[in-house]
Image (cartoon, rainbow, N blue to C red):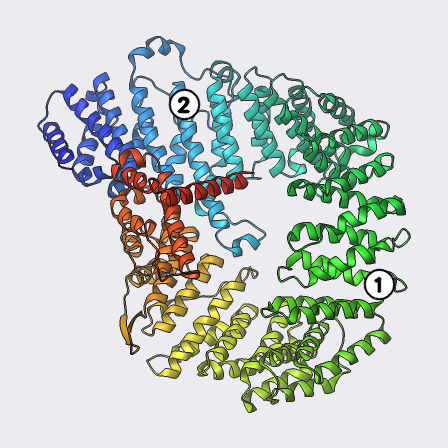
Amino acid sequence: EPTLNFLMSHLLLNIEQGMRSDIVRAYIQAIGTICRTVGHRMGKYLDKIVPIFLKFCGEPNNEEMFSEDACELRENCFQGFESFVLRCPREITPYLNCVLSIALKFVKYDPNYNYGSDNDGANEGDGDEELFDESYEEDSDDDTSWKVRRSSLKVVRSIIATRPELLETLGKECCDILVLRFKEREEHVRTDILACLTCLLESVNAFQNRNLSSGSGQKKVSVREDSPAVAILREKLDAIVRSANFHLFTVKMMNRSPKTAIAAWKMICSLQTTVSGDLKEELMGFLFDAAIRSMQDRNQSLKMESLLFLRLTLETHTKDVVCKYFDVLVPAVLKCIDEEGYKVIAEALRVCAVLISSMTATDREMSEEYEWKKWTPQFYNIVLPRLKAHDIDQEIKECAICAMGMLLNRMGSELEGCLPDVLNLFMEKLTNEITRVATLKAIVMVAQADIEIAPILPQLLKELTLLLQQQKRTLRQAALEALLAALRKNVCKVNESLMSFILPKISSQISDSDLQLSNLALQASLVILVDSESFPGQIESDVLPRALSLASSPLLQGSTLVSLLNFLKTLVRVDRSIFDCQRIISALQEEAKRTSQKSVIAKQVSINLALCTAQVIAAMNDHERKKVIEGFIKKACGGEQSERERALLVIAELAVLVDLSQFKEFVTILMNSFNDEKLSEEVKMANAYALGRLASGNQEAYLPLVLDALENTKYQYMLLSALKEIIVYESKFGSRRYFYSSLDKILLHLFTHCRNSEEGVRNMVAECLGTLSIAYPEPVFPSLASLLDQAKGSDPSNVLIRWTIVTSLKHAMANASSSQGFSPSLQPFVHLVSDENLDVKRAALLFINAAAHHRPDLIKDLLNECVTPVLLDTVELRMERVVDLGPFKHKIDDAEPLRKAALACIDTLLVSSPDSLNEDALMPIIVKGLRDSKPDVQSLCHQILIKLCTLRPGAVMNSTEAIIPPLEKACTKNTKDSQVGDEVDRVNDLIRSALRCVLAMSKLEDIEFSSRSFSDFKARLMKKDKLRDMYEVISAENRGSSVELTL
C-alpha cells in the first residue's frame, strides 16, 4: 500500500505540473494499467483522477484537439474510465453521469468525415445507396479518431454491463445515439456499436426475467408486464429496425463487411428476445428480405444468425402476421438444408420444424387458411435424406428426426403413401442409443397425429416398454411419455397378451421415489382402464397395489395426486363386477391404520388417504354410497380415537364432493364433541376440519352455528379452524352471496379474538383474515387499517392486535399472487417494521419478506423510505442479557430473531427489488453479519454474499479485505470434543456455507489477480485436506446445477 500511495502521488503530481503531452499520455496510460492491476484499491484516488481525465478529454468540437496525439490521449482517458467502472464501482458512482455523458459525446466523434443529417436513412430508402465515400478510405491510416470512438463505446458498454439499476436511464440516453451510429464508416467501431446495443438488450432482458422469477406472483400472471426499460426499447423498436435495414443489411454492406451483418443479426435476435412478438408487418418485411439475402451468402456464421432470427420470429409471432412471407421463406430455408456446414443444416432443420408448425396452425383471425399442402412434398423430400443418412453429425440426426416428427404431426394426412417407410426409419432410430431420445420425442408427435401407425404398433409398444427398464431416468421418462401418447389413440388395437406384457412394466414406475414418472404411469393406466372392451383383469393385481401404496406416501402432491384420484374414481365407475368398492375402501383404510401406527406421521398422508377414500365413495351409486357414509359417521361418533380421526377426515373430504345435507344431526354431534375431554387434540382438529367442510356446503344452515359457538365456548381455536375452512372454500369455489352478507359479523368475531392471549388462536385469526383479505380486499383492508389505527400504544391488548394484523398480511401475501386484481395500499401496515415491540417488529419483517417474494410491486414505492433503513439498522441490533440458571449462566440475545428476519428480507429484496438496496450501505452491514456470533445469522449473510457476487461484483471486490477474516474464521471453525451428532453437523454446514462464498468470490473477474490477500486466503484453505475435499464437492455440485440450468 505505501508503494501504491507513492506511485500515485508521483503520477498525479507530474500530470498536474503540465509536462510534455507524450509524458502526460504515458502517465495517464499508466494509471489505467495500475487500476486494472490493483482493482478497488484505486478507488480512494478517483476524486483526484476523474476530474483530470475529464479535463483532458475536453469537448468533441474543440478543433485544437483534432491531432493524432490528442486522439491517443483521449483513448487513454477512456480506457482509464473503463477500468474505474469495472474495478471501482462504488467510488466511481458519484462521477458516473459525467463519465457516461462524455463517453456518449465521443461515440459520434469523427471530425474528418461529414455523415450528413442524423436522420438520414432512418425512415426512407432502400438501403442500397453508398454509405460513405470510398475516397476517405485511402487516408484512413492517418485518421485515428476511430480509437476514441471505440474506447468511449467500451466505457458505455462497461456501465451497461455493471449497472442493472440504471438500465431505464441507459435505455433513454444511449439507445438513440447508438442507433444513429449504425452509419459508422469504420468496421471495428461499427461492430462495437452493435455489441454495445446487444449488451444493453441482453441486460434488460436478464433483469426482466430475474424480476419475473423472483416471486410466484409474477409467474402466475398470464400477461407479461414490461419493466420500464423494456417499455422504452419497445418504443424504439421501429427506429432500430429501420436504421439497421437502411445501414447494415444492404447488399453492399453484406458483401464488404459480413462481420457487421453478423453483429447486426445478433443484435436483432437479442431485440426479438427482449420485446418478443411486436414486429409490425413493414418491419418484418425488411428483416425477412435481409434474412433471405443472408441465407444466400457464403458466410456460414451469417447464415446461422439469420436462421436463428427466423426461428425466434416464427416462434413469437402469430400465423396471421407471418403468413404472407411463407412462400419466400420456405425455398430459402430448404436450400440451407442442402448446405455442407453441419451447424447451418441443423439450424435450418429447426427452422423447418417451426415453419411447419406455424403454417399449419389454426388462426381464427385469418379470413382464409394458408394453402400449406403445396409444400408438403418439398419438406418431405428435403428432410428424408437427412433422416436416412448414417454418416452425418449427431446434431443433424436429431434435428432431422424432430423435423420429420413435426411434418408427420401436422402434414401426415398428405403423406399416407410414405408413412410405412418413415415409421420403419423411426423404429430403426429407436433401437440406436445415440438417436433414441430424439426419436422418442418425435414418436410423441407422430402418435398425436391423425395418421395410422398400426403397422408398427406392436413392435413400437414392446420397444417402449423395454425402455422402461433402463437405468437412465430421462430415457424412462421420454419412453413413458411416448408410450402414453401411443396408447391414447391406439389402446383398443392392443391385444390382451401384449397388454399383459405392458402393464407390469408401467406399474413398476408407480413409486414415491419419482412422482413425475408415477404421474405418467397413472395416466397410462387410466387410458387402459377407460377402454373396457380390451380391459385386462391384470390391472387389479399390478397397478392397484402400487397405487394404494403411493397414496400413503408423505411426498404425494400436485398433479400426481390428481392422477391417482382420477385413477381410483375411474376404477370404481368402469366395471363393478371386477372391482369391489368396499375392498378398495378397506385397503385404503388399512393403509391409513398402518401409517397412523408410526411414531411420526405427516398430516398430509392422512389427508391424502382420506381424499382417495372420498373419491371412491363419491363414485359409487346412491344406495351403496349412503350405506358407506352411515358407516363412517358411526365410526366418527364412537370407537377408538385413531379410527374416529380417520373417519372424520373422510367425511370432511366427502362433504365437498357429495351432498351430505341429509345427515343434519351429525353436525350437532360435531359441535358437542368439542366439550368431550376424553378426545385427543388430533381428533378435535379432525372434528373441526369436518365441521368446516360440512358447513362450506350448507352455509345458511351451519355458518351461524359456528359463529354463535365462538361467543359461548372456550374452544375458540377449534371453531376458528372450522371457520378458516369455510373461508378458504368460499374464496375458491363459493357463490359468495350468503357469505358476503355475513362478512361484517365474521369480521367482528375475528377482530374480537385478535387480542386473545393464546398465540395459536391469534395465528388462526390471522390465517382467516389473510384469506378474507384476498377474497374481499375492498371491505377488509380498510377495516384492518381502522383497527390498526385504534391499536396504538404499549397496552398489551393493542400489541397483540398489531401482531395479529401484520401476521394476517403475511398470510395474505402468500396467496396474493393468484389474484391479479389484488392491489391494496399497504402503507399503513409497512410502518409496523418500526414498531417498538420486538414481536410486532419481527412479524412485520416476515410480512415484508412475504410481500417482497410474492408481490414486490405492492411495496416497491415504500422500500427506500420506510423499509430499507430499518432493515439495515435491525441487522446491527443487539439485545443481550444473561440468564442465571444456577450451576451456570446462559447468554441470550433477544434481537437474534430480528436480525435473521431482516437478513431474510434483504436476501429476498436482492432478487425482487435490487434497486432498493444501496451497496455502499449494505456491504458494511453484511461484513458485520459475517462476524456475528450466531451461526444462523452467518449463514444468511453467506447467502446474501453469494448473490452479491453476481448482482454487485464490484461491491464485493471493494470489500474483499474486510470479508476475508470472518470467512476464514467460519471455514476453519473446529468442533469441540463435547459436541456430537447434530452439533457437529451444524458446524460442518456452516463451513460448507462459507466455502460456497469462497467459490462465488473466486469466480469474480480478476479477483485473484487484483487481490493478493484473497489468493493467499484461498491457498491457505486448500492446504487443509478436509476443506479442499469439501470445496471440490461444492464446485462439482455448482457445475452440475449450471449444466442442468443450461439444458
Horizontal side of 924 relative to 405 (left or right) equals: left
Look at label 2 and name its amino acid. Answer: Arg
On the image, the x and y values in percent for residue 497 come to 88, 45
Q: Residues within 10 Å of mark 1 (few under 14, many from 20)?
A: some
Reading the image, the residue beneath label 1 is 573
On the image, the x and y values in percent for residue 268 come to 51, 31
Q: Residues within 10 Å of mark 2 (few under 14, many from 20)?
A: many
- Answer yes or no: is residue 18 visible: yes
Extreme residue toward the left, this view? 17
Extreme residue toward the bottom, this view? 712
Q: Is residue 244 above or below residue 869?
A: above
Horizontal side of 78 relative to 575 (left or right) equals: left
Reading the image, the residue beneath label 2 is 190
**Callout 1: SS:** helix
The residue sitting at 51% across, 17% down in the picture is: 254
Q: Is residue 250 above or below residue 105?
A: above
On the image, the x and y values in percent for residue 821 come to 55, 61
Look at label 1 and name its amino acid. Answer: Arg
**Callout 2: SS:** helix
Horizontal side of 941 relative to 736 (left or right) equals: left
- Answer yes or no: is residue 58 visible: no
